Image (spheres, helix red, strand yellow):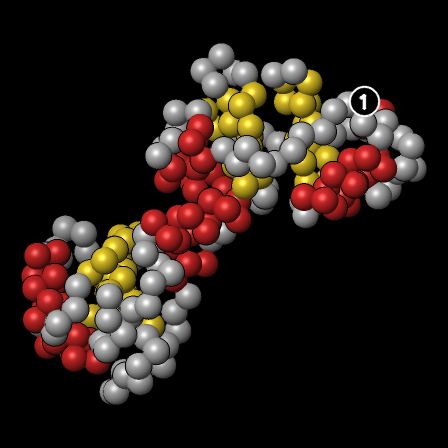
Amino acid sequence: MTAKKLINRDIPTLKSSDNVDKALQIMSEDRMFILPCVAEDTLIGFFSEELLLNFDYDTLLKDIAPILEDARVSEEVPELDVVRSFMMSEIEILPVFDLNKKYLGVIEKNQLLSDFIKKMNLHLVGGIIELNVSKKEYSLTEIARIVEQENAHIISLFFNENEADGSESLILKLDSTQISAILQSLTRFGYEVEAYQSSEPVANLEKDRYDLLMKYLSI
């Protein structure tokens, strides 16, 4: 999926001719704390509730310096690159432009995150296992066989490289919460379990210290 298809068409835009009172009303009605200000096909900038509350209600937006954000994406950028753009900034909405630099709309961070979680099956009931492995050494075929021998399946996976220390890990999302036998089998085959998450009590392993979403998406 590309950035253009991720645009939230329900997010309204502000105009330079709007005053502070109108802008705040629009934000309140749509439960937004920041909105883009657009003139025809050009993005003027963003106005946040925090910024606008510093001005009188009858002040026009054209008389207020907008928030300028360098983060932006082209309409053809793939979804994972959009996620990466949010990771590298603190913005809540990301503007999208076509190849001619025409403003097309914005992608909302919370909505993108929600859709991404569903797409990667992270919202489904099931266990999560993190293994310390090198991408040059591990065998996904073998890992899948070990999991399936315990009557479970891998429904999504991620490979992560920690830039800080160079360590590498494989994160497995399973369709079963009963992961004790899986963890024991993985350990028996020489795989180092870094962390796990399951609603089922897991015997003979360290206490869970794992927050997958915040650690690997940092959103």
Q: Is residue 157 left or right of residue 123?
A: left
Number of other residues with Cα within 10 Å of mark 1, as a class: few under 14, some 14 to 19, many 20 or more: some
Picture layout, residue 183 above or below residue 174? below
Q: Nearer the viewer, residue 196 or 163?
A: 196
Q: Would you identify the image quadrant in which residue 191 lies? A: bottom left
Residue at the outermost top position: 100
Could one spot residue 35 in this view of the protein? yes
Q: Is residue 166 left or right of residue 151?
A: right
- Image coordinates for residue 24, horizontal then vertical, percent: 79, 40
**How many marks can you see?**
1
Q: Nearer the viewer, residue 10 or 89?
A: 10
- Image coordinates for residue 151, horizontal then vertical, percent: 13, 72
Residue ID at (38%, 37%) = 79
Q: Would you identify the image quadrant in which residue 27 lies? A: top right
Q: Amino acid at mark 1?
A: Ser
Could one spot residue 94 in this view of the protein? no
- Image coordinates for residue 80, horizontal then vertical, percent: 37, 40
Residue ID at (18%, 52%) = 135
Q: Quadrant of the N terminus?
A: top left
Q: Which residue is mark 1?
A: 17
Q: Is residue 132 left or right of residue 91?
A: left
Q: Would you identify the image quadrant in which residue 26 lies? A: top right
- Image coordinates for residue 204, horizontal then vertical, percent: 25, 87
As helix, strand or loop, the secondary structure at mark 1 comes to loop
Residue at the outermost bottom position: 204
Picture layout, residue 101 above or below residue 63? above
Residue ID at (45%, 24%) = 74
Residue ID at (35%, 59%) = 122
Picture layout, residue 118 above or below residue 26? below
Q: Is residue 31 left or right of residue 73?
A: right
